[in-house]
Amino acid sequence: MDTKHIKISDYSYPLPDERIAKFPLAQRDHSKLLLYRHGEVGEDIFYHLPNYLPKGALMIFNNTKVIQARIHFRKETGALIEVFLLEPADPTDYELMFQATSHCAWLCMVGNLKKWKEGPLKRDFEIKGHRLTLTATRRDMHNNSHWIDFDWDNEQVSFADILETVGELPIPPYLNRETQESDKTTYQTVYSKIKGSVAAPTAGLHFTDAVLNDLDAHGIDREELTLHVGAGTFKPVKSEMIEGHEMHTEYICVKRQTLEKLLKHSCRAIAVGTTSVRTLESLYYIGCRLAKNPEATEEELHIDQWEPYDTHPTLTPMEAIQEVLDYLVRNDLPALHTSTQIIIAPGYDYKIVKMLVTNFHQPQSTLLLLVSAFVHGDWRKIYDYALSHDFRFLSYGDSSLLIP
């Protein structure tokens, strides 16, 4: 199959608004679980998930944490401007960014831009018992994003503190509602740790401590990695063929121990969510790059959108992951920090992911293409079942376990 010439219109299905879950269930792990196993479809309750996984398997979770990435400023004219943080620009390291005091810069989307023609925006508020003024100054465009400088007049206050005080959680636009206080809890996974995402890795929202403990009791090995989900995850495919769609770049971090665990499990993994999939599958191509250029920098290990389709590496997954681990050992690095733009669509040959836990995705989305590639084109059977059996869709919706 020529992946680049896939017509996105072939990946559409009717999704009535009433099937989109506007809020999560009161108990996360009581969502429905669709079971797709070797072409057969059935269902259960999510908290029974461990019963369907092979003992001794390795399950990989994305431990990213959603940040309160929307900041509103009101101009003296009364106009409301929304600044939506996309990715750190200065410093570019997420951890350093949240520790920054007095100044930092982000690449952002700006809502109501036509009302912000010139000059800085200011917002006064109280934090830690002190009055503070946050100033936003718009600089040049970078690709389709605005470079925004943030400055504030208190060196005791970090940018993380500011976001916790004035930022709003960016729930998905298709929910068509305002963010509520409850979203601060329900739109985070129970294992979220590393701040940086502007959208949740929603397949993980169904897990509770009880389910995680049950996985342990069933002998399932658990590991975590980090992919910071960008706003591009909601970006629709507008081109007729996917060749015309530009995937967004996402930043990944994989620890040395996770690579060692993958090797111990013969580089076979159960991925929780499409973000874990994109990270794990990118690792294979990173290893292939390192086999050719062992001295590459982490920036040079960025995986391009079409790399899996334009290159034909012959390394086994074990060889590729060993290359990445050797690279970390050689450079005395505890973890790999790089980025990926990978698009996974029909025609893709999965290297590492053997089972997938995921929600139900929007029509004509790259996430639906990823699922179709995983189940060898059998996605309609899954979605027809979900639509006809009262499953709830999208971020706050129900879950599925896919075993091709």
Image (tube, helix red, strand yellow):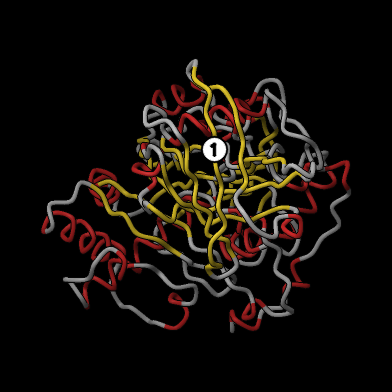
Residue displayed at 56% across by 47% down: 136
Residue most extreme to the top: 129
Numbered circles on residues, count:
1
Quadrant containing the C terminus in the rendered view: bottom right
Q: Position of residue 178 (x, y in %)?
A: 77, 35
Q: Position of residue 256 (x, y in %)?
A: 23, 47
Quadrant containing the N terminus in the rendered view: bottom right
Relative placement, left or right, of 163 versus 155 is: right
> Vertical placement of 314 versus 156: above or below?
below
Relative placement, left or right, of 250 versus 293 is: right
Residue displayed at 25% across by 52% down: 263
Residue displayed at 39% across by 82% down: 311
Q: Residues within 10 Å of mark 1 (few under 14, many from 20)?
A: many
Q: Amino acid at mark 1?
A: Leu
> Vertical placement of 35 versus 107: above or below?
above
Residue designated by label 1: 134
